[in-house]
Amino acid sequence: MLSKNNLKYILILALGFFWCSSVYLTQEQYLLKYANVDFVNIVELLFGSLSMALGILIFGILYRRIKNIKKYYIVSIIIALILSVIFFITESKTIMSICLCLTCLFGTAGFGAGYHFSLLASNIKKEYRGKAFAIGYGLGSVGTYLLILLPESFYSSMYSLALYIPIILLILYLVSNYTTLTDIEKEHYSNSFKDMFIKLSIVVLAMSLLSALSTDAISVQTINISGGYGNTRLYYCIGLLIAGFLVDKSKKIFDILTMVSFVFSLLAVILLKDNYSIHLIAALSYFFIGFFVLFRTITFVNLIDTKESIVFASAYGLMYSRIMEGILTLVEDKILTNYTSLIVTISIALSVLIFLFLLLYFQNQKVTENDTVKQLAIKYKLSTQEEKVLGHLIKGKSNQEIADHLYISPYTVKRHVSSIYKKTKMNKKELIEKCYLGL
């Protein structure tokens, strides 16, 4: 898990999340010196969130159309750095607001997030991705917590650039010199894969709605900086780490606990109205939100195992959440004030439906033959040549036919077939059933 390869990508995630989380907080506090709370909330929670989503979408569009996305990433991060500086040297709240939104778009919360998540999907094995993401984002959360312990005159002023600029430069250095993101050729997506992707997107959008109505909405409205914002970063970190290690070990248990976490978060809306401890509820809510964050991330990151060319969508779970959070900014106060019990009831029912959908649909989802062969190859660590042999084997071809097609000897084919049986612990009939009936 903690190999040199994994550690560098974990570090990039940690530095990137620390920057986007902390500079977001810094700009919010600094802008409050020039504008009222309602103005700042609209700029940050509505336009800022939508800007992040747009940045991820732009990354996805560009990734599929250009050869060297790393150059665009570097330019994007440099633009975000320049905008961060401009934000502090102007006294116009309009220019500040534009800089804040564009920093969200170009930085590690937007375009940069698309690149970082794609690095995770492309370079870290599936069995370690949950832990890698959790450790990276957990370290970033702890970093923001430690920042809050410093004097407000530092973290909410131009002086904070003395910390942010070196971090940005370090990210650029690491990405430029020590990372790779493979150029993926365009390929045709099967109807079954498109169907799965669309339904998965709808599920995550619905889950983002529940999340925004509960944990995020509550914490933003009830927790101030001095009263515990920094502490929530620690609770979030703990939730992330537990969820990250669990998702790699037992996906089914993780899915169940993710749904359970929604029930608590939604009940928290009622608990707040009954004058329970704000800090206790916020602590538990932020702990549980770690499960949803892992779900929306790892679900899309793992799509690369069925289609390598889908790597650009690795941050789409985050994108959907930002869209929902931004839109709900316009109505969440009214909804939570006037329709609390109704919203909680409907949301819990929706949570149950989502869980049943995940349990029944994705476990029985039929995939195409090529998708399944790819999944089997990844699951049982088959070599590239063994994967090719498997693809022909399940079509009923003889060793000689496979050899002729792959331009190798029948003996080599026989050796590969024997290795496939040994690694998968399945015979030819069982492999065919797996590929044609679904994993």
Image (tube, rainbow, N blue to C red):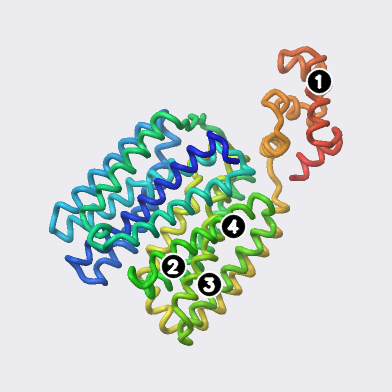
Residue at point 52% right, 70% down?
284
Query: Is tag 1's residue or tag 2's residue first in the polypeptide sequence?
Result: 2
Question: Marks 1/3: CA distance?
Answer: 54 Å
| Crowd band around label 3 with a 10 angstrom C-alpha radius: few (<14), some (14–19), many (20+) | many
Image coordinates of residue 12 in percent, x first then y, are 44, 42
Quarter assignment of residue 391: top right
Name the amino acid type tagged 4: Ala
Q: Which residue is mark 2?
A: 216
Residue 14, given in percent of the width and then of the height, sits at 44, 47
Q: Are marks 1 and 3 in contact (CB under 8 Å)?
A: no
Q: On residue 243, which mark appears?
A: 4
Question: Mark 4 or mark 3, which is nearer to you?
Answer: 4
Earlier along the polypeptide chain: callout 1 or callout 3?
3
Label disc, if present, on residue 415 of the rendered structure: 1
Q: CA distance from mark 1 to mark 2?
A: 55 Å
Q: Residue at x 19, y 67 (%)?
A: 35
Q: Is residue 274 above or below residue 373?
A: below
